[in-house]
């Protein structure tokens, strides 16, 4: 087994690959031993070259590369089965909450959340109140952010329920990493396939979203076009599913109120289901007008003439304040004990919680309720005094717009540095859950995200983070 150069960190984060002895965990023994006999910098560069040759990147020509470390993250079959059960349970409860938020509001009657908390979420759409379409899942595709605490417990850090991206990127990471490892003479064990699983499960989610009475739905992937950050993924998924990739300009209403796709020569074709991957997921602009995507889609969707994955308004359930209530929502809507816990979340609109955080702010991560992609997130222990003071002034001015979570010492994973040595870097996991006609199903693995900078807890690709292939052993 190769030695991994240690990096000092507060709170002794859990090492994914080896115990404190150190003894390699499970399949890591063979992987780390094999890495000791190869040029790891060359291996990393080979992975990068394969991704570049395949055109895998974020954004268009002026975008940035998808950076993948060659050392895979590994889950045993048993641990993954337990995690998948928890993910699927959580998505069932969140799906029920979306419907409840726009319907009876049983969660409010039970004192779990308030009307003000629901209506104060950025993703809440007032025009959908009492009008949510029935019969199809609210959450076609979900991507939860999973972290591992110092004792090895897997926790949910955030719920992403609008248009989570990354499935094609994790499939691309799988191809590049396994091909590069084999080319270097490293044996890849029997692992569960990820690309075919995504295609199968996304196809099932599209079928589950079809309007009543449509047995063979005609589906499309809706994109903003090549300028979109995740356009590579949009195009890749459309090809894999063998369905058209379209923009809003290619859709039109028909006389019956449904949607059709324009074809060359003045022809058109029906559209029954839309996998919406547009950057805008809101119904209204700040001045109250319909957004372009809502103007085209919302009425056919509400009338049951077209299904949307994911529908409008699902952001009501991935607000960071609602995140703190999900375990209670599992108990309420499913009558079960949560299999997967959340990172404890404090509502700073609560005076006692606010006082607790202000007394010791550097023990917390403070987050804007509405931030995405790592924006609006401050690890208070890592910022300068003047930066922290400015943040706390903003929190005091509008405490209800913020939540706080204790600092979780994200687990670490051996990662190839610039000079080819292995060092621990902090990681999280973005698994993907698809709502099929048989309920939610988690695809095996997902996208492990890694903070490439020493000591950093920021794993987002838009903020210099990278990714790892995630293996689930057969």
Image (spheres, rainbow, N blue to C red):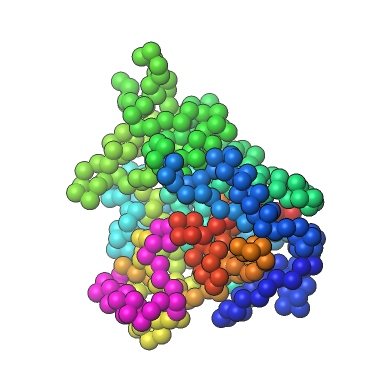
Residue at 19% across, 49% down:
287
To which quarter of the image does residue 295 belong?
top left
Relative to 375, is 24 on the left or the right?
A: right
Identify the residue at the far top of this view. 265
Q: Looking at the image, which is closer to me, 192 or 380?
A: 380
Q: Give the range drawn in magenta.
A: 372-400
To which quarter of the image does residue 426 belong?
bottom right
**Image location of residue 288, percent across then percent down:** 20, 47
Q: Looking at the image, which is closer to me, 398 or 381?
A: 381
Q: Can residue 342 be seen in this view?
A: no
Q: Looking at the image, which is closer to me, 50 or 213?
A: 50
Q: Does the magenta stretch include residue 157?
A: no
Identify the residue at the far left of this view. 287
Q: How many labels does the image show?
A: 0
Q: Does the magenta stretch include residue 374?
A: yes
**Image location of residue 148, percent across then percent down:** 60, 68
Q: Main secondary structure of the magenta part?
A: helix
Q: Can residue 355 be seen in this view?
A: yes
To which quarter of the image does residue 97 belong?
bottom left
Residue at 39% across, 40% down:
227
State whether residue 445 is above or below residue 386. Answer: above
Relative to 427, is 399 on the left or the right?
A: left
The N terminus: image quadrant? bottom right
**Image location of residue 76, percent across then percent down:** 73, 59
**Image location of residue 264, percent across then percent down:** 40, 16
Residue at 80% across, 50% down:
185
State whether residue 295 is above or below residue 103. Answer: above
Q: Looking at the image, which is closer to me, 236 or 80?
A: 236
Residue at 69% across, 53% down:
43
């Amino acid at each position: 087994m190769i030695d991994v150069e240690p990096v000092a960190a507060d709170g002794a984060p859990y090492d994914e690959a080896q115990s404190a002895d150190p003894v390699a965990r499970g399949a890591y023994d063979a992987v780390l031993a094999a890495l000791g006999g190869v040029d790891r910098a060359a291996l990393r560069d080979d992975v990068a070259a394969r991704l570049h040759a395949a055109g895998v990147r974020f954004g268009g020509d002026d975008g940035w590369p998808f950076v993948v470390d060659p050392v895979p993250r590994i889950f045993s079959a048993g641990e993954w089965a337990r995690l998948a059960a928890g993910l699927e349970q959580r998505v069932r409860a969140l799906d029920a909450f979306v419907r409840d938020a726009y319907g009876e509001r049983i969660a409010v009657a039970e004192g779990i959340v308030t009307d003000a908390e629901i209506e104060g979420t950025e993703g809440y759409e007032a025009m959908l109140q009492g009008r949510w379409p029935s019969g199809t899942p609210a959450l076609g595709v979900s991507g939860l952010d999973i972290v591992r605490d110092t004792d090895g417990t897997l926790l949910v850090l955030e719920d992403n329920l609008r248009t989570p991206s990354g499935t094609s990127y994790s499939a691309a990471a799988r191809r590049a990493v396994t091909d590069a490892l084999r080319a270097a003479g490293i044996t890849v064990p029997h692992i569960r396939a990820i690309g075919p699983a995504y295609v199968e499960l996304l196809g099932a989610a599209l079928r589950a979203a079809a309007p009543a009475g449509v047995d063979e739905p005609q589906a499309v992937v809706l994109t903003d076009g090549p300028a979109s950050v995740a356009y590579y993924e949009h195009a890749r998924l459309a090809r894999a599913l063998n369905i058209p990739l379209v923009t809003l300009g290619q859709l039109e209403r028909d006389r019956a109120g449904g949607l059709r796709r324009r074809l060359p020569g003045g022809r058109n074709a029906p559209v029954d289901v839309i996998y919406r991957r547009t950057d805008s997921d809101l119904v209204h602009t700040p001045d109250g007008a319909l957004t372009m995507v809502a103007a085209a889609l919302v009425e056919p969707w509400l009338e049951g003439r077209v299904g949307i994955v994911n529908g409008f308004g699902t952001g009501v359930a991935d607000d960071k304040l609602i995140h703190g209530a999900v375990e209670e929502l599992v108990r309420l809507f499913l009558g079960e004990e949560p299999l997967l816990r959340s990172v404890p979340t404090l509502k700073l609109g609560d005076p006692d919680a606010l006082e607790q955080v202000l007394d010791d702010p550097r023990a917390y991560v403070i987050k804007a309720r509405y931030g995405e992609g790592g924006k609006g997130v401050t690890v208070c222990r890592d910022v300068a005094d003047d930066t922290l003071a400015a943040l706390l002034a903003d929190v005091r001015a509008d405490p209800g717009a913020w939540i706080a979570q204790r600092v979780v010492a994200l687990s670490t994973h051996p990662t190839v540095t610039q000079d080819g040595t292995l060092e621990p870097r902090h990681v999280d996991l973005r698994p993907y859950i698809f709502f099929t006609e048989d309920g939610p199903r988690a695809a095996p693995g997902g996208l492990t995200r890694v903070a490439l900078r020493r000591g950093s807890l920021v794993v987002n690709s838009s903020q210099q983070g990278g990714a790892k292939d995630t293996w689930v052993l057969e």
